[in-house]
Amino acid sequence: MVRILCTYFIDWAGKVTIIIPTELIYHQYAIQKQGSVVYCAHPDVERLRCDHRMVGALVGTLPRLPLQNTFHGLPLLLMPEEVTLALSKNIIVIESWEYPRTAKDRIKCSVYAYLWNLGFYITRGTKFGGDFLTYPGDPMRFHSHCIVEAVERDDEIKAIDLIGKGRLATNVKKTFVLASVTEKREEVFTLSWAGF
């Protein structure tokens, strides 16, 4: 566990920005928070990925190929759900992390923690219309099997949306999962399309 002491300020929109002293930039788990995301710029990103199954997304440019946008390098952008789980497991320490704020954020964090405890690697699922994508192993070696959307247990979902999500998932060779996790129980429903 690494403790980072830094200063922060809150702008008029309520977004929090943490300023890290420059001497911490290349030390273990140097973290910078902008809004509701965290950037990690350090030589040991591999530890987060391999030891803790926290994938994030590389958002920097490669030093030798700065004008291309196919491959990315450091810093690493962590999802707010990854940061919340890392804080709860004492993997990282950030002063004054204020997430989750809404009921939807709490459900997403609960579903993320549930999937992480099952042993999945998890990335963002917005590209496929969900909250998360789950992988049986490292995403560099495996394809995702599921598109997961975190929902409240009593949320109303239109039939047309269920059909669209099931068809989309089937067309990209995945299973669409609706997941709801509360303190009392976990409910997971899968959708697949069997069109004729």
Image (spheres, helix red, strand yellow):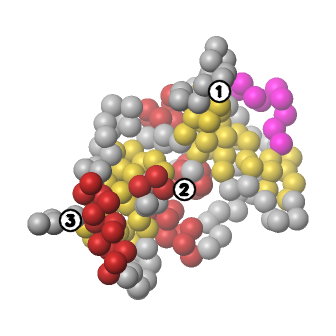
Amino acid on which disc 2 is placed = Glu
Q: Secondary structure at mark 1?
A: loop
Amino acid on which disc 1 is placed = Thr
Decide which of 157, 182 is in the foreground and name it. 157
Q: Could you tell which of marks 3 and 2 lies nearer the N-terminus?
A: 2
Q: Secondary structure at mark 2?
A: helix
Q: Could you tell which of marks 1 and 2 lies nearer the N-terminus?
A: 1
Q: Residues within 10 Å of mark 2 (few under 14, many from 20)?
A: many
Measured Cα–Cα span from mark 3 to mark 2: 29 Å
Q: In the image, which disc is placed on residue 61?
A: 1
Q: Is residue 141 above or below residue 54?
A: above
Q: What residue is shown at x 59% (from left), y 30% (from top)?
A: 69
Specify the segment rendered in magenta.
Answer: 19-28
Decide which of 102, 184 is in the foreground and name it. 102
Quadrant of res 193: bottom left
Q: Quadrant of the N terminus?
A: top right
Amino acid on which disc 3 is placed = Trp
Question: Mark 2 — residue?
Answer: 81
Q: Is residue 170 above or below residue 18?
A: below
